[in-house]
Amino acid sequence: MTTHTFKPDMPPPSSSIGVVAWMRANMFSSWINTLLTLFAFYLIYLIIPPLLHWAILDANWVGTTRADCTKEGACWVFIQQRFGQFMYGYYPADLRWRVDLTVWLAVIGAAPLFISRFPRKAIYGLSFLVVYPIVAWCLLHGGVFGLVAVATSQWGGLMLTLVIATVGIAGALPLGIVLALGRRSNMPAIRVVCVTFIEFWRGVPLITVLFMSSVMLPLFLPEGMNFDKLLRALIGVILFQSAYVAEVVRGGLQAIPKGQYEAAAAMGLGYWRSMGLVILPQALKLVIPGIVNTFIALFKDTSLVIIIGLFDLLNSVKQAAADPKWLGMATEGYVFAALVFWIFCFGMSRYSMHLERKLDTGHKR
Amino acid sequence: MQNSIGAPKQRLSLSDPKVRAWVFQIVTVVAVITLGWFLFDNTQTNLAHRGITSGFGFLERSAGFGIAQHLIDYTEADSYARVFVIGLLNTLLVTFIGVILATILGFIVGVARLSQNWIISKLATVYVEVFRNIPPLLQILFWYFAVFLSMPGPRAAHNFGDTFFVSSRGLNMPAALVADGFWPFVISVVLAIVAIVLMTRWANKRFEATGEPFHKFWVGLALFLVIPALSALLFGAPVHWEMPELKGFNFVGGWVLIPELLALTLALTVYTAAFIAEIVRSGIKSVSHGQTEAARSLGLRNAPTLSKVIIPQALRVIIPPLTSQYLNLAKNSSLAAGIGYPEMVSLFAGTVLNQTGQAIEVIAITMSVYLAISISISLLMNWYNKRIALIER
């Protein structure tokens, strides 16, 4: 008795596998798709080769002065020569290790927060948030522990950008949470005050806020009381940003099911305890990606301090490009600044997406 | 609180939530008023010390400086109030052009990201990721300093068919000047619109009564083209074109868009379009595939599936975030201060503030303009959103 044996499967037809088939399906499936593909290739041809030539192949990489840039393409010598200024502004060169140390401390100190198995993360995080700003202030500004004082007017470059962005978000978070709670409050007077505050700051551009903090704040304060320029800008940024944080947090508060509020009330918790122990922990977890996005927006907006004459990364580049020794280097400078901003913002937006996936508990309302 | 039998007479106590709420609110209101009064009082003393008289009288005074772009007539002898109007108009101009261009570009890129064509969707992704992660001010400065100001002068301008010229002085283009047939043309356009509205109403009524469709789009298009064309034939062309000509070192005649305006509009369009593209993409993706299948099983073809099923539902998701992008664009137009395009902030909060020293009045006016723009855009979009919103039972 013979058993029936199946013949081995035939391989798929060669037209349905491999690169050709993939291209046929994804790029040339119809005449309109073919046209689009050709158009896309034409666009790439227009953009990529000249860009490559300019930025890499024909670029000038070594040298010390403008005269060394003899080739057609970009003159990256300019960036090399001015790199210190772009990173630290006018911070004294022999003290720049303090800035580096501050950054390293932030990286090392915050690293455990990103390790999911780290024990007592909340306590560690809170103490880090309290201790780090003090250490950072001592290191950056100096004037204590025998460190030479560096006035904030000498701060600049990427360092200033980072300072404004981080202080801005750190100050805006608590204020924003309070405003969001106030907006959802049952008390009409509190609600009106919070809504007015939020809608006012959201309705005006940051640039007018910066103008206001630089020309009007001195008028608002009592005689003799005066802040330096950076602090004034920071106050403006924090007030402005807190309104945006408040709206993000409000979204989180609204996403918490009503049952949670009722359950907290049924447990006999008062307002502050039900918010602090039940609602806010859940709501804040929900809005972390939103807050990261707000931070990205703030990071981009820090470039506006150019208007009130602070030398952040963008203003340092603008300043350096106006130097008679390096005339005509505007493109290189802006491309470099754009690259730095892009790396930061793109990295953060990827991280925010990752968080969104990680925090997604799967039961959306 | 419910009355219970034999309950003791209620006293005011801080453990009563209602009493606490009142106390809390009163404290807040008093604190806000005190803070306001404190700021007001400080300002008064400071102003008195510096010898600045407050008030809006300065608006009447003559400005005495030139402005690179003004949509209405302006001379240096005109008042600050007129400078304000010019700044406002320039802001609105940028916002208007920017909103239209960014919407078009954003929708194209957003749809392209969803395209089945691999390379097109990847290109769109690259576009979005590159441009939304670079600060708008940096993009404005780049377009202005690195692109437009480094272009050749007018004598070596890029020439597009002898009608458009791009140079470091901006974009020179033909000007449309009013000719004999202008008013008849305007009237004919109005007539065409009225005819289209009447035709649409009639067609809709007939469709509801008999179910017979009518080629509204094509008939409408025909009406829109034929009636104005007839007017142009009968009464002469509505406009005549004045070409820009190179005379000496610059162009004479025609309209010119200054490089500041070009850089600002381009940068804002490109930046905002990246965000709009993402909104459009998520809006279209939010309509579940079951909707397309349901429409198919009802026998709808491609076009009506899109226009009657997909787009209306996608728009509901798209409109609210789109509104905030428009608001952002209006607010971002203030970044023009970085390149000196004469709009509200750079002209009014910059030059006028420096000349007059009336910080409070000038900043207050500027802020209220932006608040007014924000509120009107959001009211308009809320009204539209309400019209298309899902009516839930």
Image (spheres, coloured by chain):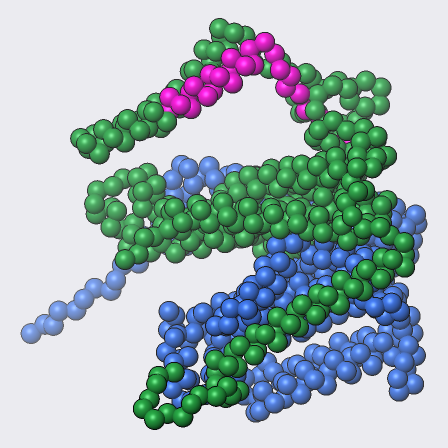
Chain colours: A blue, B green
**A294 horizontally vs A64: left or right:** left
**B114 horizontally vs B210: left or right:** right
Residue name at image x 55 percent, y 11 percent = B181
Q: In this view, does B326 lie above or below B101?
A: below
**A76 horizontally vs A277: left or right:** right
Residue name at image x 34 percent, y 41 percent = B307
Does the magenta portion include B184? yes
Does the magenta portion include A285? no
Could one spot residue A56 in this view of the protein? no
Where residue B76 sits: x, y (%)?
A: 83, 31
Residue name at image x 47 percent, y 40 percent = A36
Where residue A120 sits: x, y (%)?
A: 58, 91
Where residue A272 sits: x, y (%)?
A: 52, 83
Q: In this view, does B315 lie above or below A357?
A: above
Q: Residue furthest left?
A: A1
Q: Which residue lies furthest to the top in this view?
A: B234
Please tell me which residue lies in front, A242 or A188: A188
What segment carries the magenta color? B168-196
Q: How many marks?
A: 0
Could one spot residue A176 in this view of the protein? yes
**A338 horizontally vs B116: left or right:** right
Where residue A90 sits: x, y (%)?
A: 89, 65
Q: Quadrant of the N terminus of chain A?
A: bottom left
Residue name at image x 72 percent, y 51 percent = B364
Q: In which quarter of the image is the C terminus of chain A?
A: bottom left
Q: Quadrant of residue B87?
A: top right
Q: Quadrant of residue A49?
A: top right
Q: In this view, does A319 lie above or below B174?
A: below
